[in-house]
Image: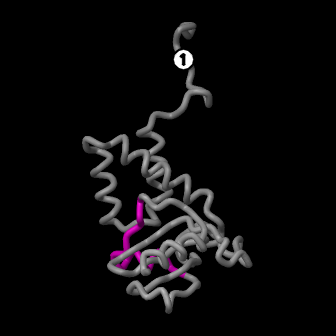
């Protein structure tokens, strides 16, 4: 017989941060390179482990709610940007993940070598980006494509 003072695990008792972070890591793994994953997971074992665990959880939550391919069609600059990848002066702003929820055919806005005049919307393979050492911006705040473009114009001025 169970004591009345023992707590039964129920949905009312939240999972520990480490368990939530481990589950979230499975969600974000396809969206980051192995090198970036190693750095994040090293951080999760270090002195700022709670911070890094929360970053992983927040990122997984964002990926979970991302629009799928074609869900933002017709929104133009009002489309929400969920993820930002970067390498050197190039940036990829992801507005939609693959319709199957994976990383083969996302959609977004690409700015190569800082050239905003030649930037374009199109399909992007996240798998290909990370295979070429492109990093996911862990601290990116989702916002509209219009806001991204305005920020870039302001910086260029």
Residue 146 at x, y = what percent? Answer: 60, 73
Point 56% across, 25% down: residue? 9
Residue 136 at x, y = what percent? Answer: 41, 67
Point 39% across, 74% down: residue? 86
**Label 1: element kind:** loop
Q: Is residue 85 above or below residue 50?
A: below
Q: Residue 48 vs residue 139: left or right?
A: left
List the residue tagged with mark 1: 7
- Label 1 neighbourhood size at 10 Å, few (<14), some (14-19), many (20+)? few
Q: In which quarter of the image is residue 78?
A: bottom right
Q: Give the range drawn in magenta.
A: 124-138
The foreground one among 47 and 75 is: 75
Q: In this view, does 19 lie above or below 83?
A: above
Residue 37 at x, y = what percent? Answer: 35, 60
The foreground one among 54 and 20 is: 54
Q: Which residue lies furthest to the right in this view?
A: 74
């Amino acid at each position: 017989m169970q004591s009345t003072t023992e707590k039964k695990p129920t949905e009312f008792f939240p999972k520990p941060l480490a368990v939530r972070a481990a589950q979230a890591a499975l969600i974000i793994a396809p969206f980051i390179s192995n090198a970036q994953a190693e750095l994040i997971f090293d951080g999760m074992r270090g002195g700022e482990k709670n911070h890094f665990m929360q970053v992983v959880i927040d990122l997984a939550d964002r990926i979970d709610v991302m629009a799928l391919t074609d869900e933002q069609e017709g929104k133009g600059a009002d489309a929400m940007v969920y993820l930002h990848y970067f390498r050197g002066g190039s940036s990829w702003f992801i507005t939609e993940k693959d319709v199957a929820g994976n990383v083969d055919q996302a959609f977004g806005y690409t700015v190569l070598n800082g050239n905003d005049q030649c930037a374009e919307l199109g399909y992007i393979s996240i798998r290909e980006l990370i295979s070429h050492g492109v990093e996911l911006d862990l601290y990116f705040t989702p916002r509209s494509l219009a806001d991204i473009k305005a920020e870039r114009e302001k910086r260029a001025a």
